[in-house]
Image (spheres, rainbow, N blue to C red):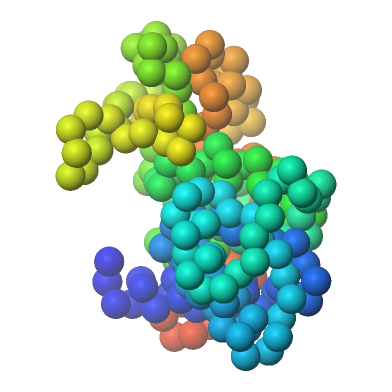
C-alpha cells in the first residue's frame, strides 16, 4: 500500500469516527480503512468521554475494538444500530458496493442491514463506474457445495476461483467456518438481479454485493479532504 493511499484511508476513517455521537450503538466494520475509524473512536472515548457501544463484524474487529477501549455488545443485546462504519472494495455512483476482501462480508451485511445509517469508507481507488470492473464478488459457500456453486457462477458469466490461504495450506476459512469463492465478472450490468441470482444458489450463505445498503460514502484524499456522497 502506498503512503498516499494509506493517508487517504486514515482521512476517511477519522471522518467516519467524527459522525459518531454520544450514546450511539455502532457497527464496527473490518479492514484497514475501518481500523483507522476504530482507533479514532478509541481516542474519542479516552479524550472526550464519548459513551458508545459497538458491535464488531469479525474476530479481527472485535480484537481491535477491545484493544482501543470500545465497549462491545452482541446483536442479542441490541435490536438496532444507530450507525455502522465499514470499508468497501468498490463503490459505484449509485453507492452500491462490493465488499469482502477480508472475508467478513456476511457479518458485515447483517450489521449494515440493522443500522439506521450505514457509512462506507474508502480511498479514491475504490471508485468505479460499474461494479465488478476491479474486484471480484466474494461468495461464502458451504465447503461440500464449492464445486456446484462455482459451476452455477460460471453460468452467470463469472470466472470463479476458490480463495486460498496465505501462510497456510488450503482455502481461506471465514469466521463461520465456510469457504470463499471469488467470482470475477468483467462488469456487472444489473447488480440487483445478480444479487438475487447468487442468493438463490444452494450452498451459498451470502455474497459481497451490497445493494441499496449504504446511506453514505466517505472518500478520503491524501491532501486531507473528504468527499461525502449520500444516497438520494
Find residue 110 and report its horizontal and vertical position in percent.
Answer: 65, 41
Question: In the drawing, does residue 140 fall left or right of residue 161?
Answer: right
For the C terminus, give its image quadrant.
bottom right
Q: How many marks?
A: 0
Residue at the image point whose x is 60% and y is 69% from the top: 70
Is 44 or 156 nearer to us in this picture?
44
State the image coordinates of residue 222 (x, y, percent, origin top left). Answer: 41, 80
Q: Is residue 131 above or below residue 154?
A: below
Residue 91 seen in this snapshot? no
What residue sits 43% from the left and 41% below the top?
Answer: 103
Residue at the bottom extreme, as displayed: 47
* Residue 2 as seen in the image, left or right of residue 116: left
Can residue 17 be spotted in the picture?
yes
Q: Quadrant of residue 170?
A: top left
Q: Is residue 196 above or below residue 89?
A: above
Report whether 192 appears left or right of 2: right
Q: Position of residue 183 (x, y in %)?
A: 39, 29
Where is residue 171? Give x, y as percent: 28, 30
| Quarter where residue 26 is shown | bottom right
Residue at figure coordinates x 44%, y 19% from the top left: 142
- Above or below: residue 148 compared with residue 100: above
Choose between 166 and 163: the one closer to the eye.
Answer: 166
Please state, as top left, top right, bottom left or bottom right, where the N terminus lies in the image: bottom left
Residue for point 58% across, 33% down: 191
Amino acid at each position: 500500500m502506498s503512503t498516499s493511499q494509506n493517508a487517504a484511508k486514515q482521512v476517511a476513517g477519522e471522518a467516519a469516527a467524527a459522525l459518531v455521537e454520544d450514546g450511539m450503538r455502532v457497527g464496527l466494520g473490518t479492514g484497514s480503512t475501518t481500523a483507522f475509524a476504530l482507533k479514532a473512536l478509541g481516542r474519542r472515548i479516552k479524550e472526550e468521554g464519548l459513551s458508545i457501544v459497538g458491535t464488531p463484524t469479525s474476530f479481527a474487529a472485535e480484537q481491535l475494538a477491545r484493544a482501543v477501549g470500545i465497549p462491545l455488545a452482541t446483536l442479542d443485546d441490541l435490536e438496532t444500530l444507530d450507525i455502522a462504519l465499514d470499508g468497501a472494495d468498490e463503490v459505484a455512483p449509485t453507492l452500491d458496493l462490493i465488499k469482502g476482501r477480508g472475508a467478513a462480508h456476511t457479518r458485515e451485511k447483517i450489521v449494515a442491514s440493522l443500522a439506521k445509517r450505514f457509512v462506507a469508507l474508502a480511498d479514491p481507488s475504490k471508485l468505479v463506474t460499474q461494479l465488478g470492473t476491479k474486484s471480484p464478488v466474494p461468495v461464502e459457500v458451504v465447503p461440500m457445495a464449492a464445486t456446484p456453486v462455482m459451476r452455477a457462477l460460471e453460468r452467470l458469466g463469472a470466472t470463479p476461483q476458490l480463495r486460498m490461504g496465505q501462510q497456510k495450506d488450503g482455502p481461506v476459512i471465514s469466521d463461520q467456518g465456510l469457504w470463499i469463492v471469488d467470482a470475477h465478472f468483467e462488469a456487472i450490468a444489473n447488480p440487483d438481479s445478480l444479487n438475487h441470482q447468487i442468493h438463490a444458489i444452494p450452498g451459498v450463505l451470502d455474497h459481497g454485493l451490497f445493494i441499496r445498503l449504504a446511506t453514505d460514502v466517505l472518500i478520503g484524499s491524501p491532501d486531507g479532504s473528504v468527499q461525502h456522497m449520500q444516497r438520494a
